[in-house]
Amino acid sequence: MEAFVSLDGLVAPLDRSNVDTDAIVPKQFLKSIARTGFGAHLFDELRFLDPGELGQDPDTRRKNPAFSLNEPRYAGAQILLTRENFGCGSSREHAPWALHDYGFRALIAPSFADIFYGNCFKNGLLPVVLEAAVVDELFDALRRNVGYRLWIDLPTQTVRAASGQTWAFDVDAARKQSLLAGLDDIAMTLSGIDKIHGYEAVRRQQEPWLFGGVD
């Protein structure tokens, strides 16, 4: 998993509340578990005017000119600014896969759906929760300024604008550490592999019948 420490990134807006995971990556693209290739279909029904299928070249499709991510000013954005309850609906992990594969490293919203929020940390994405009034301010600044950027620092848990204005955000200590280290749940477990082997060795001596050591 890609680690996240700090990011100076271009911001793109998605000014919608209650964006569910089917809108983030529609069901017809859930045929693969490769974790890659989903970025081409991120917000598929919003980005395109025609239906698509997994693996289809997005350059062959008609883009929706009214959708924010299709605007040239947001090309290469790494921070998505959106509204409350982002990532609601089903628990599909393909949603953070698609966001990350598209190029996003951080999301800012007043709230996220619980399962989606946890899945972000497991896939190298930082979901930042800021107050609704602050998100309103950021949307206003984003509309006024082409090339609007924010600096997000995970160690200090702060978001900073070019003006110097700074906002703090909360994050669970364990999730913070795993993202800083670039370790998902499996990797975190394997980081203690020596202790696991040591425990198994003791158990094998004390209770050999558990390991087929007794006829």
Image: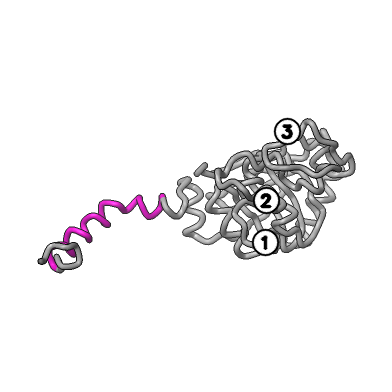
Q: Nearer the viewer, residue 68 or 200?
A: 200
Magenta region's main secondary structure?
helix
Instruction: Give the residue displayed 66% in from the left and 39% down from the top.
Output: 103
Q: What kind of element bears circle 3?
A: loop
Q: Residue 204 vs residue 80: left or right?
A: left
Q: Residue 28 vs residue 133: left or right?
A: left
Q: Which residue is mark 3?
A: 57
* Marks 1 and 3, the one that precedes in the sequence: 3
Instruction: Give the residue displayed 57% in from the left and 44% down from the top.
Output: 35
Tag 2 and tag 1, C-beta contact below 8 Å: yes
Q: Position of residue 72 (x, y in %)?
A: 82, 33
Count all numbered tags in the image, as a single digit: 3
Please tell me in which quadrant of the rendered image residue 70 appears: top right
Query: Seen from this angle, which residue lies furthest left?
Result: 215
Does the magenta run of residues contain 71?
no
Q: Amino acid at mark 2?
A: Leu
Instruction: Give the residue displayed 78% in from the left and 37% down from the top.
Output: 74
Q: Position of residue 188 (x, y in %)?
A: 40, 53
Instruction: Give the residue displayed 22% in from the left and 60% down from the top.
Output: 200
Q: Residues within 10 Å of mark 3 (few under 14, many from 20)?
A: few
Can you say which quadrant of the picture contains the C terminus? bottom left
Q: Residue 114 vs residue 42: left or right?
A: left
Q: Amino acid at mark 3?
A: Asp
Q: Which residue is mark 1?
A: 112
Q: Which residue is mark 2?
A: 107
Structural distance between the alpha carbons of marks 2 and 1: 10 Å
Q: Position of residue 132 (x, y in %)?
A: 76, 62
Q: Amino acid at mark 1?
A: Phe
Q: Residues within 10 Å of mark 2 (few under 14, many from 20)?
A: many
Please tell me in which quadrant of the rendered image residue 135 appears: bottom right
Q: Which residues are magenta?
A: 187-206
